[in-house]
Image: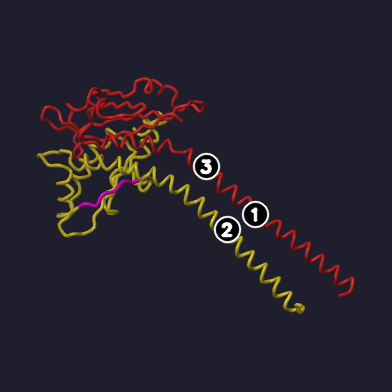
Amino acid sequence: MYKRGETTLSDAFSFILIAVLLAILLVIFIGFGGDNVESEIGVDDAIYSYENIFVLESYLNSFVEDDKIIGDLVNDWLLTGNKDLLIKETKNIFYPIYGACYVVDYNGQFFIGDSSFTGHRSTCVDYPNFENQEIYICIDFSKFDERLTLGEEGKCF
Amino acid sequence: MDIGKKGQVYEKEQLKMIFYAFVIIFVVVFIILVFTHGVKIDVETSNLEQHSIVYRLLDSETCIGLENGILNLNNFNEGRLKSCFNTFNGVQMNLYHLNGSEIRIVELNKEMVAQKIVCGLKTAKYDCYDTRKLVIISENGDLKNGFMDFKVITNV
C-alpha cells in the first residue's frame, strides 16, 4: 500500500516520463521529416553539382588571349594577386551564356558575376596551387537554369 | 478509505485517462504522418532522373565524348548517341557557338521530345528540365567556347 507522499511522487514521475517520451517522439518526427526533405533536395543538388563539374572543367580549360587558358590566369592571380584579366575573360565567357544570372566565387576572396547567387546551388572544386593552400573555386548558375525551365531566361540579359 | 476520498481517487484516474488518451492520439498521428511523408518522398523522384540523364551524357567519354570540358563535334551526332545511350525519356541537345549561332540539334526519342510543348502545364503528364552548360567545342582542331542547352522530358 502506497503512502500519500509515494503516490504523488509516482504520479509525478509517470507524467514526467510520458512528457519526456512525447518530446523524444516530437524530436524524432521533426528530425525524420526534416532529414527526408533535406536528403531529397541533397540528392538533387549533389547530382546537379556533378553535372556542373563539367562546366568548371570547360571554364578552366577555356582559351583566352595569348594562347593562355583561364587556369593560367588563376595561377597568375595566385602568384601575383593580379586578377583584372581573370575577371575580364571570365565575364567574356559567362555573360553571353548566362547573362547576369551566374556567379564565380574565388575562395570567398572575390566574386565574378552576381554574388547574391552564391551558395544557392554551388558547384565547387579544389584548385591545386603552388603553396598547398586550400583554394576552392565555386560556380553557381542555378538561377539561370530555373528561369530557362520557365522560359524566362531573357530576364537574365 | 471513505466515500469522499474514493471519489477523489476516481476523479484523478479519469484525469489520467484523458491524458493517456492524448498520448495515444499523438502516437497514432505521429505514425500516420511519418508513413504519409515516406510515401510522398518516394513519388517525388522525377528531378533525380532528369539530372542523372544529363550527368550520364556528360560523363560518358565514349558516347558524347566530353573530355576535360572539350566536346568533339565529330562525336556529337544522332547516330552515335542513339547507339551508345539508352533512355525511354526525351532528350534534346542544342549546341551553340558563344555568339548564339546554332551548330547542331540532337534529339533522342523524338516522340517524347515532341511532348515538350506541354511542359509547364499543371495537368501535363510530362515533366521537363532545362539546363545550359558551357562547353569547349573541338572542330577541325580548333577549340572554341560554346554552350549546350539540354531539355529532358520525363513521364510524371
- Judged from the image, the secondary structure of the residue bearing numbered disc 2 is helix
- Crowding near pointer 1: few (<14 within 10 Å), some, many (20+)? some
**Which stretch appears magenta?**
A121-127
Residue at point 43%, 48% (across, down): A39
Compute the Cα span from label 3 to label 2: 20 Å
On screen, residue A88 above or below B23: above
Specify the amino acid type for callout 1: Phe
Could you say which is closer to the camera, residue B87 or residue B131? Answer: B87
Q: Are marks 3 and 2 on the same chain?
A: no
Task: Indicate yes or no whether the magenta region holds residue A123.
Answer: yes
Q: Which chain is red?
A: B
The residue labelled by disc 3 is B39
Assign the C terminus of chain A to one quadrant of the image: top left
Circle 2 residue: A25
The location of residue A68, given as percent across then percent down, is: 12, 42
Magenta-highlighted stretch: main secondary structure?
A: strand
Q: Chain of mark 1?
A: B
For badge 3, the amino acid type reads Val
Whether tag 2 and tag 1 are in contact, CB under 8 A, the answer is yes
- Left/right placement of residue B62 relative to residue B133 reads left
The reply, left or right, for residue B51 in relation to residue B13 is: left
Q: Quadrant of residue B66?
A: top left
Residue B39 in the image: state x and y as whole percent. Answer: 52, 42
Three-letter code, disc 2: Leu
Q: Quadrant of the N terminus of chain A?
A: bottom right
Instruction: Identify the chain of the residue marked 2, using the numbered disc in the image.
Output: A
The residue positioned 18% from the left and 51% from the top of the image is A77
Query: What distance separates the C-alpha of mark 2 from that of mark 1?
Result: 9 Å
How are the colours assigned in the image?
A: by chain
Distance from disc 3 to disc 1, alpha carbons, whole Å, reads 20 Å
Q: Give the residue at mark 1.
A: B26
Residue at 58%, 47% (x, y): give it: B33
